[in-house]
Amino acid sequence: MASHEESESKRVMVITYYWPPSGGSGVQRWLKFVKYLPQYGWQPYVFTPENPAFDLKDESLLKDIPSEAEVLHFPIWEPYGLFNKLSGGGVKVNANSAPQADSWFKKISIWIRGNFFIPDPRVFWVRPSVNFLDDFLREKRIRHIITTGPPHSVHLIGLGLKKRNPSLKWTADFRDPWSEWGFLDTLKLSKLARKRHQQLEKKVL
């Protein structure tokens, strides 16, 4: 039988924006990891938004979540709802999309998205998540965390937790690049905004 210390050492928290019923490629990697972790003696925890703004849904993926996994849904505020109201509600968005620049309003929105919401519009989720998880990880004695991005704001949650608890073992999973990501070119970044991306990326790495 595993000792109490060994049991604690095999608890891991996955922090991800994408989680079923989210569909698409962003959810697949860590859903599969979490699915099989219990078979290797690991207790998985998942921290994900309660009300995320994504279009792609695949309800069939829910069956891949193992019963052993404890999934925490935490509220998130995203500016897309406000944008849709201002634009008449006709804009579809997902976690890594910019609105199509076919009007002056949308062009301005793209610029604001790129230069004020750094690294992405999920940045408002970072501070409340760090505050909540700092207590939760200590309570559950979870020593390992994994952050997966994009959205790269998720990595800032890991950075904040690591600063508060230097002994925490943190893995940052990059499914796409950060400062060299081609998607950023569509957002009309200023030199200052691009430099900020590079600075945040360096802190995480």
Image (cartoon, grey):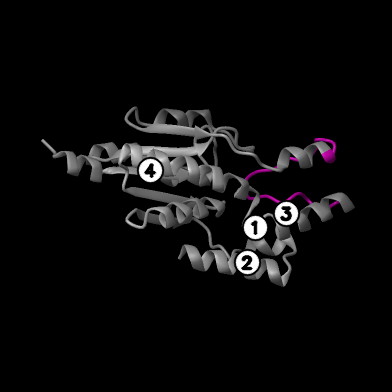
Dot 3 alpha-carbon crowd within 10 angstroms: few under 14, some 14 to 19, many 20 or more: many
Which numbered marker is on residue 118?
Answer: 1
Left or right, 199 with reference to 165: right
Q: Which mark is residue 194?
A: none
Q: Given the image, on which type of amino acid does mark 2 rest?
A: Arg
Asked if the residue at tag 3 contacts the one at tag 1, i.e. Cβ–Cβ closer than 8 Å, the answer is: no
Q: Position of residue 137 (x, y in %)?
A: 37, 42
**Alpha carbon of mark 2 to alpha carbon of mark 4: how far?**
28 Å
Instruction: Point out the tag, 2 or 4, that comes first from the N-terminus.
Output: 4
Residue 114, image x, y percentages: 71, 58
Q: Position of residue 102 (x, y in %)?
A: 85, 51
Specify which label sits upstream in the sequence, 3 or 4: 4
Q: Nearer the viewer, residue 78 or 165?
A: 165
The single residue placed furthest to the left in the displayed view is 1
Q: Position of residue 162 (x, y in %)?
A: 41, 55
- Overall secondary structure of the magenta stretch? loop
Query: Label 1 to label 3, Cα distance in Å?
Result: 8 Å
The amino acid beneath tag 3 is Arg
Residue receiving disc 2: 196
The numbered dot on residue 113 is 3
**Residue 33 visible from this viewpoint:** no
**Residue assigned mark 4:** 13
Q: Residues within 10 Å of mark 2 (few under 14, many from 20)?
A: some
